[in-house]
Image: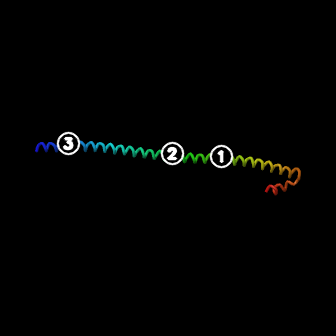
């Protein structure tokens, strides 16, 4: 009986050792899973930031395009205004000097 009792104690010791080894493995796996989850969260955050940056780059490009278009329109308008002003001044001089009817300048300008 003592021999059988000793065998049970040996089996209990082996089972306890196996249990402790499994428990250590599970704890290590839990830590690995936690690290993987943190890495995934960091990766998602990084991807979100990159998407925001890409979106900002698109917005910056649109703003630059709008600025360029406004600049072109303003430069074109200045050129047109300059041309119109020169033509208007020439017409006013003509009405004063050649036609000699300066009182009608405003009628033609409207």
Tag 3's secondary structure? Answer: helix
Tag 2's secondary structure? Answer: helix
In primary-sequence order, the first of circles 3 and 2 is 3
Real-space Cα separation, disc 3 to disc 2, in angstroms? 55 Å
Real-space Cα separation, disc 1 to disc 2, in angstroms? 27 Å
Is 9 positioned to the left or the right of 44 in the image? left
Q: Quadrant of residue 33?
A: top left
Q: Are marks 3 and 2 in contact (CB under 8 Å)?
A: no
Residue 89 is situated, as x and y percent measured from the top left of the image, at 81, 49
Q: Residue at x 55, y 47 (%)?
A: 56
Task: Give the crowd class for mark 1: few <14, some 14-19, many >=20 residues within 10 Å.
Answer: few
Q: Nearer the viewer, residue 33 or 110?
A: 33
Residue with the mark numbered 3: 13
Rendering colour mode: rainbow
Residue with the mark numbered 2: 50
Q: Residue at x 51, y 45 (%)?
A: 50
Quarter of the picture containing the C terminus is: bottom right
Real-space Cα separation, disc 3 to disc 1, in angstroms? 81 Å
The circle drawn on residue 68 is: 1
Q: Quadrant of residue 36?
A: top left
Task: Give the crowd class for mark 3: few <14, some 14-19, many >=20 residues within 10 Å.
Answer: few
């Amino acid at each position: 009986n003592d021999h059988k009792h000793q065998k049970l104690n040996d089996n209990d010791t082996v089972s306890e050792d196996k249990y402790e080894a499994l428990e250590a493995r599970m704890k290590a796996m839990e830590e690995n899973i936690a690290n993987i989850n943190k890495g995934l969260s960091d990766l998602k955050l990084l991807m979100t930031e990159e998407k925001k940056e890409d979106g900002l780059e698109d917005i910056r490009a649109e703003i630059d395009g709008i600025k360029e278009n406004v600049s072109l329109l303003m430069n074109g308008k200045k050129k047109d205004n300059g041309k119109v002003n020169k033509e208007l001044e020439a017409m006013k001089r003509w009405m004063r000097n050649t036609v000699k009817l300066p009182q009608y300048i405003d009628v033609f300008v409207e």
